[in-house]
Image (cartoon, rainbow, N blue to C red):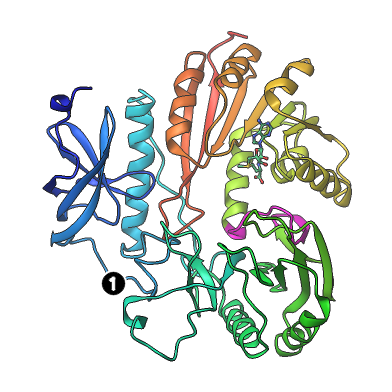
Amino acid sequence: MNESKYPVKRGKEYVLKIEKLAFGGAGVARVDQYVVFVKGTLPESVVRVKIGRRKKNYAEARLIEVLEPSPQEQEAPCPYFGWCGGCTWQNLSYRDQLKHKQAIVEESIHHLGGLSHIDVLPVIPSEQIFAYRNKMEFSFSDRRWLLPEEMDSDTIDRKFALGLHVPGTFDKILHIDRCLLQSETANDILQTVSAYCRQEGLEPYGIRSHQGFLRFLVIRQSADTGQIMVNIVTGFEDTKRLLPLAKKLTETFPQVTSVVNNINTRLAQIATGEKEVLLAGQSFIQDRIGPFVFNISANSFFQTNTAQAEKLYDKVMEFAALEGREVVWDLYSGTGTISLFLARKAKEVIGFEIADSAVEDALQNARDHQITNVRFVGGDLIQQLHQISPGPDVLVTDPPRAGMHEQVVRYINELAPGRIVYVSCNPTTLARDLAILSRRYDIEKIQPVDMFPQTYHIETVVQLHLRGGER
Ligand SMILES: C[S@@+](CC[C@H](N)C(=O)[O-])C[C@H]1O[C@@H](n2cnc3c(N)ncnc32)[C@H](O)[C@@H]1O
């Protein structure tokens, strides 16, 4: 596009009125019909912005000043709001959050998917809107990111932080005493670990220098039993320095039934170790979704909002409408939780999953629950789907954010199962995939489920029926 064809100039300031919120959380404004995304803004506010990156259909702009605040704005309860990258919608009431999530799903389906005639059911809200997460991962750093009011303090140790990331900085960490998304006991554990490590001189890992001991603190709590696992991830093995901390945690907090040390000597900033040392208690905790109790070890995947996961899976079951005779395929099956739910009402379930560790967990979960009518196919499902015949009667799919590969969507249309249940964590890729599926399928129901209050994230379950006797 020629410079003259862009309705906005890079680097130039504009005064804009924010119309709505987009998936990703940014405010949306328009200059003529050209869309401008502005992070950190709310609908109905009037803002001064500076234009940054421009694309054919939209530009991104940086907020300079709020000229008229949004009437929807409320005070965010978290003191780290605006700095921490975690929950960017805390300054909206939960009712408004749900309204915007609903609008985002509708807008995606109607405009991006071109499916303007289809209604979206009201979002199923989360009963808990704070302290709903069963897992939080905090990073240690030798460079603390200072809040404006901390800049001049000489009592703050700038070489120790345990907390969360500030968007746009990779090596500095915002030190956090309390996160509203986890339980108060988990917050007490966070503070205990932080104080102990500082007192005892356990050195944090430098995300830039790659030197140092402490890398991550992961706290997991069972919604079912209240049991807590504390996982300390270090850059090298030195068990004797951690044993007194493990003892202190189990003595102070009776809920702590597991303390483990994952050792990650690699450069990659991930909280998964190549080796795990058990420091106290057991190496797993147990949580329940519906009738199923799962053993969760430090590196297993588990849905982070347990109560909502049950509602989500119940909706999948309702939309799958199984009668017991069906062969069901569960695409992107992860650790097989949806497969187990489906297996109770199906003849056979085949799960497809690329991650070997998830397939192993899925097999173990099936054995633990004596479920024998499920099997799991490892590898990339683009290849694997073609190896299995006949095709399924019902197909459930729960792809990652990028949605399904176009080849997979087209192949599903060819396979033509009678019913499809699509579980999506990204309304934009969902809309794209539904547009292709709708060539052969009627979209019966679209049900958003809120798993992540205070954030823009939204899960959606869709029921599709093969159009009359086409198969
Ligand atoms: C959103 S998760 C689904 C989790 C699972 N259904 C559940 O409820 O716990 C997506 C899963 O797709 C898997 N995956 C991603 N790409 C894949 C591919 N090309 N083939 C097979 N599995 C894939 C990921 O490893 C991940 O476990």
The residue indicated by pointer 1 is 75
Q: Is residue 218 visible?
A: no
Image mark count: 1
Where's ligand 1: which quadrant? top right
Magenta stretch in the rendered image: 289-307
Report if residue 297 lies within the magenta region. Answer: yes
Residue placed most toward the observer, 55 or 462: 55
- Residue at 82% of width from left, 49% of height from top? 365
- Residue at 22% of width from left, 55% of height from top? 63
**Can you give x and y, in whole percent of width and height, for residue 430 in the image?**
48, 32
For the C terminus, which image quadrant?
top right
Relative to 6, does residue 76 appear above or below in the rendering? below
- Residue at 43% of width from left, 29% of height from top? 431
Report if residue 140 lies within the magenta region. Answer: no
**Quarter residue 347 falls in:** top right
**Can you give x and y, in whole percent of width and height, for residue 46 in the image?**
13, 54
Q: Is residue 316 visible?
A: yes
Residue placed most toward the observer, 450 or 341: 450
- Residue at 47% of width from left, 32% of height from top? 429
